[in-house]
Amino acid sequence: MRFDGAQLEALAAVVEEGTFDAAARRLHVTPSAVSQRVKALEQHAGQVLVRRSRPCRATEAGDVLVRLAGQLRLLEDESLREVRRAGAPGADADDGPVAVRIAVAVNADSLSTWLPDALRELPLGVHLDLRREDQDHSAELLRDGTVMAAVTADARAVQGCRARPLGAMRYLAVASPDFVARWFADGLGALDRAPLLTFNRKDALQEQFLRTLGHEHAEPPVHYVPSSTAFVDLVRHGLGWGMVPDVTANPLLAAGTLVELAPGRHLDVPLYWQHWKLRTPALDDLTHRVITTAVGALHPTG
């Protein structure tokens, strides 16, 4: 069975943009044309590929074809780059480099600490589309074809992907000195009621740490702070305690701005680089950069 490229592109646009109208604007065609292409692809596949909801969502089979559309797009862009680089007949050097866009899911703490070092001086024409997602949930974006690679906590490779270990991010439970004096002057018994900060409702680090200390049934007040910088600032200002990467916490601990709640206790979160098995120069280069940087920035696992 062969698939029509324009139909695959229409399906991917609908899923990525969320509506048929938005997909039409992206493809510079009418919504009717987008609908006809998606319907023709569904007839060819023999099943529904996209749920007509708001926003539109791909079915399980649709996810497979959205991923295929992205792979074909990447291969086409890379091939055109190679043709121009080789100076093949018909290639116009004045057209400039062909842009290759690579969508990557990454957790906020990696994005605010070690990952930017891997992205310095990217090759001209390689454009990143970074999607911030919790490390425990980023693999889902690989499954549905939204991203080509991800920093994830899932060691199990998504179908069609490779998983490579990066190392572990180490988190320390910290708070301001005043907060510790107020809540934990007599030890950590007040963990059940002391306010804590968490990044969002997917963030389970604080709950995991409470369980390691025997407070698995604790229901303390929670502040949701979906910004790595603001999270650290608010912990530092005494709004609550929270789990902070050691690379961020250590200078503040040394300065006395933060205090560890349980010195010697920490959480290590193993991270993995999952990426499409598809081999292209841009994706290979990005993979090499990420893995090399992680070796020097993260803690060894095992």
Image: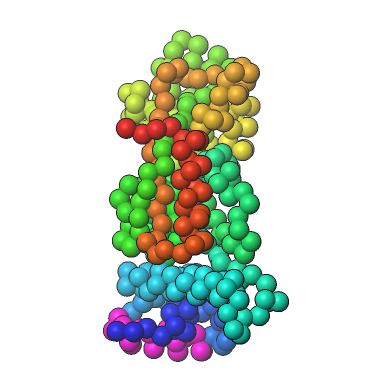
Q: Quadrant of residue 70?
A: bottom left
Report whether 149 appears left or right of 121. left
Can residue 257 be found in the magenta stretch? Answer: no
Q: Where is residue 229 in the image (x, y as percent from the top left)?
A: 61, 38
Q: Nearer the viewer, residue 277 or 48?
A: 277
Q: Which of 238 and 9 is in front in this view?
A: 9
Look at the magenta stretch and give its main secondary structure: helix
Q: Nearer the viewer, residue 275 or 81?
A: 81
Report whether 69 appears left or right of 114. left
The residues colored magenta run 33-47
Picture layout, residue 122 above or below residue 9: above
Q: Where is residue 248 in the image (x, y as percent from the top left)?
A: 57, 31
Location of the N terminus (image quadrant): bottom left
Q: Which of 247 and 179 is in front in this view?
A: 247
Q: Is residue 147 visible?
A: no
Q: Position of residue 21 (x, y in %)?
A: 55, 80
Q: Position of residue 125 (x, y in %)?
A: 62, 64
Can residue 41 be found in the magenta stretch? Answer: yes
Q: Residue at x 45, y 25 (%)?
A: 193
Location of the C terminus (image quadrant): top left
Picture layout, residue 142 above or below residue 170: below
How many numbered marks does the figure carry? 0
Q: Which residue is drawn at 61% across and 81% down?
A: 91
Q: Residue at x 55, y 75 (%)?
A: 83
| The residue positioned farthest toward the right in the image shown | 94
Q: Can residue 185 be seen in this view?
A: yes
Q: Which residue is drawn at 54% across and 30% down?
A: 247
Picture layout, residue 90 above or below residue 93: below
| The residue positioned farthest toward the top in the image shown | 186
Colour convention of the picture: rainbow
